[in-house]
């Protein structure tokens, strides 16, 4: 190879590294495209315990001190009513649904509204599901967990997590069923959903947990504001199976193991009880 070609290859490689380093946390979760490079199978060469060693830019997966998910234990949670009700203004917007190989993602192509935390607006970018749940409540793992991924103008991420258990069908997922049936077994398949209202995914529960954590897939970027809704929703077994069909056969599950809390604060917001006269 000629010296000039060596230089060209070096420049291209350096540019790729700079681009990767500049990807904001929420965008990194939206564009995770590493399903062949990492696995959820414990003990495998690219399993969760090895994610941090696979790539230099994934090192936080192994060395980070604020990793997600965690167990939300009542013994470690502090009641903080000053957090207030979740301040969001979602709206119906054009959306697409994508089989990413490691999960199903609903991506909003239009303005789906935002969530405001401490005066900062975090705009809703996408939804995706993990099965079983990644976060646990007092050690209990649920059947599925929805992540609503938001991004601020500065590229910071805030994620709302919603837990599900098998039971009655979920109306929001029912709207997606025809599309899920078409893409469930086809990796990288994308379908237009038309206009979708994310308020059906969020629900109306007011009690929630709040802590600082990370993305739960590589590169495991930290600085993510997590909000886990306390009320557990239900989804039918069929809906759960449709979402699981996106996961590679050798994984079956797409939930990262629990991470150490490492003295982080975990808060819970609960409204004052109504007075009865």
Image (cartoon, rainbow, N blue to C red):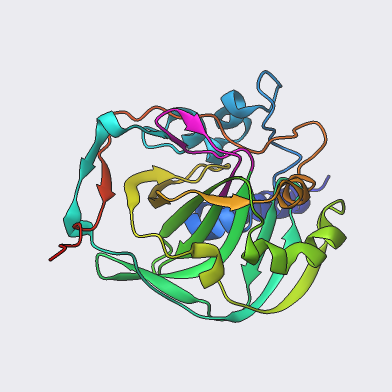
Asked if 31 appears above or below 54 in the picture, the reply is below
Queried whether the magenta region covers residue 134, the answer comes back as yes
Looking at the picture, how far across and down is residue 60, in whole percent? 47, 36
The quadrant where residue 173 appears? bottom right
- For image coordinates 51% across by 80% down, the residue present is 91
Using the rendered image of the protein, determine whether residue 23 is visible from the camera's viewpoint: no
- Comparing 57 with 166, the one in front is 166
Residue at the spot x=71%, y=21% of the render? 44
| Viewer-side residue, 9 vs 218 | 218
Q: Quadrant of residue 54?
A: top right
Q: Is there any visible trace of residue 233 in the rendered image?
A: yes
Residue that sits furthest to the front in the current view: 277
Q: Is residue 275 left or right of residue 150?
A: left
Q: Position of residue 36 (x, y in %)?
A: 76, 40
Q: Is residue 250 magenta?
A: no
Residues in magenta, as a range:
131-145
| Residue 16 appears left or right of 135 | right
Name the outermost residue toward the left: 277
Towards the viewer: 81 or 157: 81
Along the line of sight, the residue nearer the viewer: 186 or 17: 186
Query: In the figure, is residue 275 to the left or right of 90?
Result: left
The residue at 74%/45% (across/down) is: 244
């Amino acid at each position: 190879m000629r010296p000039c070609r060596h230089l060209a290859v070096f420049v291209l490689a350096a540019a790729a590294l700079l681009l990767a380093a500049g990807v904001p946390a929420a965008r990194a979760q939206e564009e995770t495209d590493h399903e062949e490079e990492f696995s959820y199978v414990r003990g495998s060469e690219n399993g969760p315990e090895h994610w941090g060693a696979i790539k230099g830019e994934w090192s936080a997966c192994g060395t980070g001190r604020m990793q997600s998910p965690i167990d939300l234990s009542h013994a470690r949670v502090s009641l903080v009513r000053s957090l207030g009700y979740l301040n969001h203004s979602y709206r119906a917007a054009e959306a697409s649904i994508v089989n990413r190989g490691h999960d199903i993602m609903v991506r909003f192509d239009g303005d789906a509204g935002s969530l405001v935390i401490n005066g900062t607006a975090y705009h809703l970018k996408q939804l995706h599901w993990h099965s079983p749940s990644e976060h646990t409540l007092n050690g209990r793992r649920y059947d599925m967990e929805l992540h609503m991924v938001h991004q601020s103008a500065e590229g910071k991420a805030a994620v709302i997590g919603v837990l599900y258990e098998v039971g009655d069908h979920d109306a929001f997922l029912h709207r997606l069923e025809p599309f899920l049936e078409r893409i469930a077994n086809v990796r990288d398949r994308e379908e237009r959903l038309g206009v979708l209202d994310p308020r059906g995914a969020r629900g109306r529960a007011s009690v929630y947990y709040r802590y600082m954590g990370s993305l739960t897939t590589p590169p495991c970027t930290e600085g993510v504001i997590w909000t886990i809704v306390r009320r557990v929703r239900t989804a039918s077994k069929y809906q759960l199976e449709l979402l699981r069909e996106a996961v590679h056969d050798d994984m079956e599950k797409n939930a990262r193991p629990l991470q150490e809390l490492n003295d982080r604060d975990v808060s819970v917001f609960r409204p004052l009880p109504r007075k009865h006269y």
